[in-house]
Amino acid sequence: MAQISSKKRREIKQQVSLWLDMGWPRWRINNACLETFDGDPEFVDGLIREIRHELGNSQDLERRDFLAQQLTRLEALAVKAQEDGNLAVALGAFKEMHALTGLRTGGFP
């Protein structure tokens, strides 16, 4: 594809992102870009990789934030349950925390 302006690149990237959100496969996006923007398949593949990389990074952050929130809530629940003498609830909270962090992989070897 010939040299394109940053505005045109953003426009194409936004459209490709929309098609990805719609679940279109790569070959269909490439065909649509060829028809719509006279887009080079290698350029479009680069945009798809870039979009997926950005999406993956944002999901990793959201997952980490969610995990931190859940662990904080479970820890507060476990502490409160221990203070109230409800050891079954405290044990359940600790087991759930271990499961979320991957520390519990099943039974004993």
Image (tube, rainbow, N blue to C red):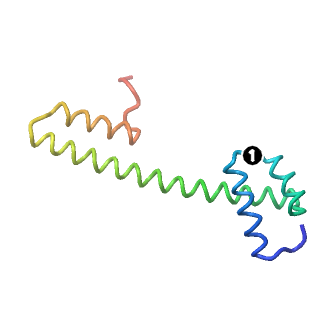
Of 35 and 61, the residue lying toward us: 35
- Left or right: 59, with 6 as reference point: left
- Which residue is rendered at x = 84% and y = 57% of the image? 33
User: Is 66 above or below relative to 54?
Assistant: above
Of 108 and 74, the residue lying toward us: 74
- Which residue is rendered at x = 68% and y = 58% of the image? 51
Identify residue for label 1.
Answer: 24
Quarter of the image holding residue 92? Answer: top left
- Where residue 43 appears, as percent x and y from the top left, is 83, 61
Quarter of the image holding residue 105? Answer: top left
- Quadrant into which the C terminus falls: top left
Amino acid type assigned to the residue bearing label 1 in the image = Trp
Question: Exactly how many numbered labels are in the figure?
Answer: 1
- Which residue is rendered at x = 75% and y = 75% of the image? 7
Quarter of the image holding residue 52? Answer: bottom right
| Badge 1 element | loop
User: Is 104 above or below relative to 19?
Assistant: above
- Quadrant into which the N terminus falls: bottom right
For label 1, the crowd category at 10 Å Cα-Cα, with few meaning under 14, some 14 to 19 and many 20 or more, is some
- Left or right: 97, with 12 as reference point: left
